[in-house]
Amino acid sequence: MANHSPHLDNVFSALADPTRRAIIARLSQGEASVGELAQPFDMALPSLMKHIRVLETGGLVESEKHGRIRTCRLMPGSMKGAEKWLVEQRAIWEARLDRLESYVATLEKKPPKKRRRRD
């Protein structure tokens, strides 16, 4: 996956905030109304709605309004792109660390060079 993906940017932006991560954690237990989602937070409803909009932009959450009640649900498939990117990055860094470990092992096997003393 490309490093410059608007969708990936939106997902990581949405996940960057602890309030939004808490909303996602709550929605992982099942759908909930905005009122239910707002209960643990000390913020006005419009502020919570901004968080929900960011989650919707990232494709992590979907909301639907029935009468006066807006219900939100998690969209777990949208994290697949972020998960794939993280797996790719992990593989790259593990390969780099393996090469570094190999290099350090070769340095440890070589006898140290004698240095001239300068007086």
Image (tube, helix red, strand yellow):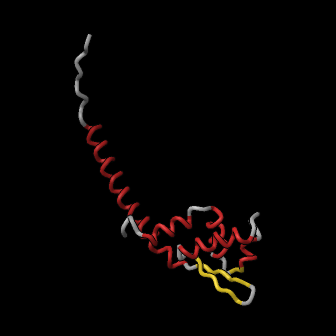
Quadrant the N terminus occupies: bottom left
Residue 51: x, y in percent? 64, 69
Task: Depth check: give the residue in front, 119 or 72.
Answer: 72
Residue at horizontal 65 percent and vertical 86 percent from the top: 64
Which is nearer the eye, 91 or 49? 49
3 up-or-down from 58: above or below:
above
The structure residue drawn at horizontal position 65% and vertical position 76%, both measured from the top left corner, is 27
Q: For residue 48, which quarter of the picture?
A: bottom right
Residue name at image x 69 percent, y 68 percent: 47
Quadrant (top left, top right, bottom left, bottom right) of the C terminus: top left
Using residue 57 as the reference point, say whether residue 30 is left or right of it: right
Count of labels in the image: 0
Q: Residue furthest bottom?
A: 67
The residue lying toward the viewer, choosing from 25 and 7, is 7
Q: Position of residue 2 (x, y in %)?
A: 36, 68
Q: Quadrant of residue 68?
A: bottom right
Q: Residue 93: x and y, percent?
A: 37, 56
Outermost residue to the front: 46
| Residue 12 vertical position relative to residue 115 in the rendered view, above or below | below
The residue lying at 35 percent from left, 51 percent from top is: 97
In the rendering, at what x and y percent does residue 79 appear? 50, 73
In the image, residue 102 sits, relative to residue 60, either above or below, namely above
